[in-house]
Amino acid sequence: MSPARLAAAACVLLLAGPGCRRGGPAPEGGSGDPQAEARTLIEGRRFDEAIARLGDAADAESLYLLGRAWAGKAETAPVPTPAPGSPANAAPLKAEEERALAYLERAVAAQPDHAQAHLAIAQLLAPHALAAGSRVASPPGEGVSVDRVLHDFGDAIQADPAGTAAVEAMIAFATRAGRRPDADAGYQELVRRRREDPDVLVRYGDFLAGPGGDGEAALAQYSQALIWRPDDTATRLKVVDIHLAAASSLLAQRQYAMAEARLGQARRLTVDPSSRQAARLRELEDRLRDIRGR
């Protein structure tokens, strides 16, 4: 056998040898699967090694992992200097982010239902969209828009019909961006996917009672949560607060019968006579009695 054939045979027999592997040596304890090894390297923040391990692979999963690795490298990369004439709070993409975005976009082009790649794109661009949205004035088409990122989150949610990671991320982003209707839609989707989770119902109620500005809609979510968890005192008190606020407003409008009905609902849910809600309830009931006694 010729020396060349002997070398080839030895390479086949000694697959563990680094010179016979494509993409370079595996990490210590590696499985021989470049994608699995790349994931391990990325989790360990060994981004350059992950990039080298994947090499020039062009399948959707490898492209996604390359995008993640470059996004990881971007975390510690220096912020580029904005171009002359750019707004003071401009946040241009770093070179590493550009590379990450290119790989991730190739991943979703190769596999349109790659939920993780869609989510990675949205998370990569989200800080830039928030920075662009905070400008007093921004030329049309400049930077990354909030709408673009919401669309990417939507693609991730659609590609993963059962998961909640993309929904949670979209809610957080939409809330920070001041896009209340989009955050509300995200909560509705989260409730749909976790129907029997009272914590989600309470969170949605908190959103509606706060940024959403709809106490009556919040009341419906809290009431649903109490069906699953009737001993939840904190949520009961939130319901009481909404009834008391409504009763106060109805008294001001001279809608006394409706105010009395709201106070009755508040009284049925108030279990601690020393609570702030109980004191407010007594105050409003006294006011109603005074009005009717005139």
Image: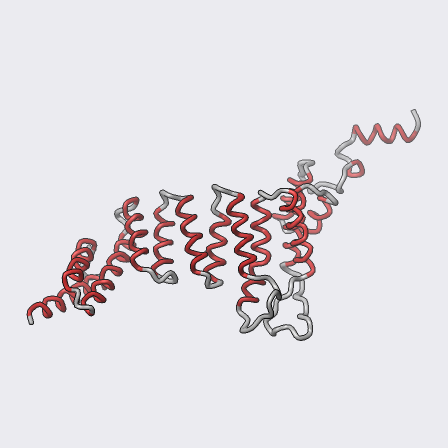
What residue is at 58 percent from the left and 49 percent from the top? 118
Residue 191, placed above or below residue 288: above
Residue 260, placed above or below residue 20: below
Q: Where on the picture, by quarter, is residue 21?
A: top right
Residue 95 spot, x, y in % from top left: 69, 60
What residue is at 69 percent from the left and 36 percent from the top? 32
For the view shown, which residue lies furthest in the right direction?
2
Of residues 169 and 69, the one drawn nearer to the viewer in this rendering = 169
Residue 211 spot, x, y in % from top left: 39, 62
What residue is at 30 percent from the left and 44 percent from the top? 228
Residue 7, placed above or below residue 205: above
Side (left or right) of 224 relative to 189 = left
What residue is at 60 percent from the left and 67 percent from the top? 140
Residue 289 spot, x, y in % from top left: 10, 66
For the view shown, which residue lies furthest in the left direction?
293
Colour basis = secondary structure
Side (left or right) of 100 relative to 259 = right
**Figure quadrant of the N terminus:** top right
Side (left or right) of 156 relative to 53 = left
Q: Where on the picture, by quarter, is residue 271?
A: bottom left
**Figure quadrant of the C terminus:** bottom left
Count of numbered marks: 0
